[in-house]
Image (spheres, rainbow, N blue to C red):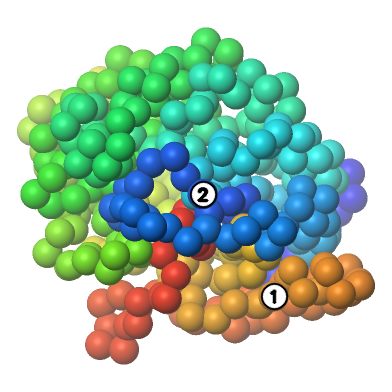
Amino acid sequence: MTVITPQLVDSFGRTHTNLRISVTDRCNIRCFYCMPNENVQFKPKHELLTFEEIVQVAQVAAGLGVNKLRLTGGEPLVRANLDRLIAGLARIDGIEDIALTTNGILLAEQAAALKDAGLQRLNVSLDGLSATTFRAIARREGLERVLAGIAAAQQLGFEKIRLNAVAILGLTEGEILPLARFARERRLELRFIEFMPLDAEQRWRHDQVLNGETIRRELEREWGELVPVTRTDPSQPATDFDFADGRGRIGFINPISQPFCGDCNRLRITAEGQLRNCLFSMEEWDARRVLRSGGTNAELAQLLRDCVLHKKPGHGIDSPEFLRPERAMYQIGG
């Protein structure tokens, strides 16, 4: 195997090895923490990167030390023939891990093709197990299809399936224990994610954040003290715990109450080819322009380096200078 010297190091010494690739801004539900409910203006198809263009960017990134890829959206499974893209990414030398974040609604139909193509890990968004909570957040139906997708993926032998639950004060407190029981019974890892100011309708308020420490106390009242897990990867966003009885693992992603920017190793590319060094970045680097104007791989590599070098020390959500990004989560890529 080729030994690759990491070259995506920012001015704070953080080495970037994780690329998140949005393949579409479209989605089949309308979660309020991500998208508008109605009248969404999606990018026309010709503005989205082709699969071949995505593979080219990933190949260049791999040459600079990137070894992990995650496909996001929007909802990535609404893009046709996604397994073809995964197969192309799986052939890239240096890529060790390919994951997918999905709402799970189309997962049952596509899981086999995704696995055969080389997909290794799944993150399934599941904010609650009650139909009422699901509807309140997603503003569409679909809970049963999500659960069917999770079951199908497990039956096909996906060993690494994680559930992601956005925690929202006044809405999801009643889902904490049911989600934990569901994950424990099915041997799934569960992560709670604090609600972030990336909603398209810009209604986020700090007092809507259900913080990770509150959720942890709720879980410990039910199952006893959670056991901290030694972090093998300092760049992972979650703080993980095992249940004391050995039945399951729980994680907390606390970008509001406990920012983890100091160890961040992630950069992103939007569905239309804009590089971003942070979810909350106010600046983008245009990879599509390089790709479609006859630019070279060397130019793409320099664009990636420039993007990383301009990364700030943190997102600054709690600072007076914080500015919400103009783009919502579905336009950036989760």
Q: Quick one: 175 or 81, which is closer to the camera?
A: 81
Q: Earlier in the sequence, mark 1 or mark 2?
A: 2
The residue lying at 72 percent from left, 37 percent from top is 86
Q: Marks 1 and 2: which is nearer the front?
A: 2
Tell me residue 312's x, y (percent): 49, 81
Element type where label 1 sits in the image: strand
Tell me residue 316's x, y (percent): 35, 78
Tell me residue 224's x, y (percent): 14, 29
Up/down of 157 relative to 119, above or below: above
Amino acid type of the residue tagged 1 in the rendering: Asp
Left/right of residue 239 with respect to residue 274 in the rendered view: left
Quadrant in the picture for residue 227: top left
The residue lying at 64 percent from left, 18 percent from top is 112
Residue most toward the bottom? 321
Q: Quick one: 226 or 333, which is closer to the camera?
A: 333
- Residue under pointer 1: 286
Left/right of residue 2 with respect to residue 58 in the rendered view: right
Q: Quick one: 210 or 35, which is closer to the camera?
A: 35
